[in-house]
């Protein structure tokens, strides 16, 4: 089941798969304790937020999302993420009351967004850059006795395309014996 | 006597403000783990401006040349300058990967 976690790759680091806390780090150098499930930066208020939502809801153990540091100028992606959890999106797929320039959620379904809003509580530490304060928030939320939120929700799957492996010497040097009907009679090296 | 003359053209960078966005879409290039990952999005327009993208394909690899060739094959019809931008960004990404340094996708 844990191999299903975090289906949409990105610039994040994973720690404890059973951790209750994920951390979004904005404009600061900070490494959270390894009790967190996942942490990483957020840049854009559209695709960046979508990746966080898709990856966080894939792990039902994550119940708290700490958003810390200084918000990204112009994009206001941290505040837009907080607004998504609080308000959801409108019929134009725009995050309601998000301050970012283009806070549109286009690659996730409404069901996935609802799941995010129900599974995750945001811990808004925007403007907080002090390591001790963020560490304390991580600890306080890690020890809360909340259960996992059901099964993993896979909002997107990157499916590997089957390719022929030309490094496979058996394939390159295989001998195929065909019969008079043109059918393969024997394969071998 | 000169048999043939060819022009020597001084290189000039197009200012960022004059770079035309590609109507076929855009790419997000990231280095994570031991590979380079490239996501291809088609443009989503709202009120006559690009506000986001629709994820269509994801490419992964370690080498800029392999990724470039694969992207050309799977995403035809981009603007020429867009292909060249992708090529040089992928080379930067490969350098970062090989030197274990951080990579941030640059502008056009």
Image (cartoon, coloured by chain):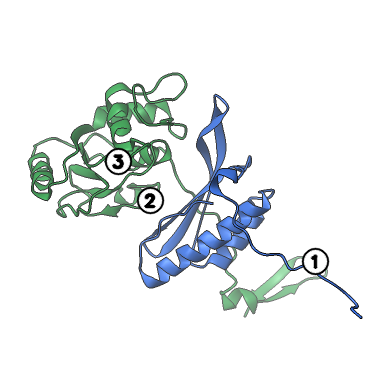
Chain colours: A green, B blue
- Rendered image quadrant of residue A15: bottom left
| Position above or below: B89 against A126 | below
**Left or right: B59, with A121 as reference point:** right
Which quadrant: the N terminus of chain B? Answer: bottom right
In this rendering, which labeled residue sits more in front, label 3 or label 2?
A: 2
Local SS, label 3: helix
Q: Which residue is mark 3?
A: A56
- Give coordinates of residue A60: x percent, y percent: 25, 39
**Left or right: A24, with A170 as reference point:** left
Residue at mark 2: chain: A
Q: Which residue is mark 1?
A: A182
- Give coordinates of residue B3: x percent, y percent: 91, 78
In this rendered view, identify the residue nearer to me: A16 or A128. A128
Q: CA distance from mark 1 to mark 2?
A: 49 Å
| Position above or below: A102 against A137 | above
Work out whether mark 1 precedes mark 2 in sequence or the reverse, and give the earlier one.
Answer: 2
> Residue drawn 17% across and 42% down?
A20
Q: CA distance from mark 3 to mark 2?
A: 12 Å
Q: Which residue is mark 2?
A: A10
Residue at mark 3: chain: A
Q: How dense is the environment of label 2, judged by Cα within 10 Å: few (below 14), some, or many (20 and up)?
A: many
Label number found at residue B93 = none
- Give coordinates of residue B56: x percent, y percent: 55, 43
In this rendering, which labeled residue sits more in front, label 1 or label 2?
A: 2
Answer yes or no: do the residues labelled 3 and 2 have beta carbons within 8 Å? no
Q: How dense is the environment of label 3, judged by Cα within 10 Å: few (below 14), some, or many (20 and up)?
A: many
Local SS, label 2: loop
In this rendering, which labeled residue sits more in front, label 1 or label 3?
A: 3
């Amino acid at each position: 089941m844990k191999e299903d976690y975090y289906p949409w790759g990105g610039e994040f680091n994973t720690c404890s798969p059973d951790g209750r806390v994920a951390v979004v780090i904005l404009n600061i150098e900070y490494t959270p304790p390894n009790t967190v499930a996942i942490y990483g930066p957020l840049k854009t208020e559209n695709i960046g937020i979508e990746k966080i939502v898709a990856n966080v809801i894939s792990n039902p153990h994550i119940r708290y999302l700490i958003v810390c540091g200084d918000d990204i100028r112009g994009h206001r992606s941290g505040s837009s993420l907080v607004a998504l959890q609080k308000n959801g999106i409108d019929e134009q797929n725009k995050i309601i009351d998000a301050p970012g320039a283009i806070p549109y959620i286009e690659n996730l379904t409404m069901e996935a967004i609802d799941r995010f809003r129900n599974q995750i509580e945001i811990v808004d530490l925007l403007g907080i850059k002090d390591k001790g304060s963020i560490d304390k928030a991580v600890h306080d939320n890690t020890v809360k006795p909340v259960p996992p939120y059901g099964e993993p929700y896979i909002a997107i799957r990157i499916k590997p395309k089957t390719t022929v492996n030309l490094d496979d010497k058996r394939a390159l040097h295989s001998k195929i014996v065909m019969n008079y009907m043109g059918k393969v009679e024997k394969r071998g090296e | 006597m000169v048999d043939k003359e060819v022009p020597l053209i001084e290189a000039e960078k197009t200012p960022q403000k004059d770079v035309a966005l590609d109507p076929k879409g855009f790419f997000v290039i990231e280095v994570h783990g031991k590979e380079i990952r490239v996501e291809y999005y088609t443009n989503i327009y709202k009120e006559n401006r690009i506000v986001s993208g629709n994820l269509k394909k994801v490419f992964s690899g370690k080498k800029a040349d392999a990724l470039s060739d694969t992207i050309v094959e799977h995403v035809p019809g981009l603007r020429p300058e867009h292909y060249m931008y992708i090529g040089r960004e992928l080379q930067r990404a490969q350098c970062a990967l090989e030197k274990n340094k951080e990579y941030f996708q640059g502008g056009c």
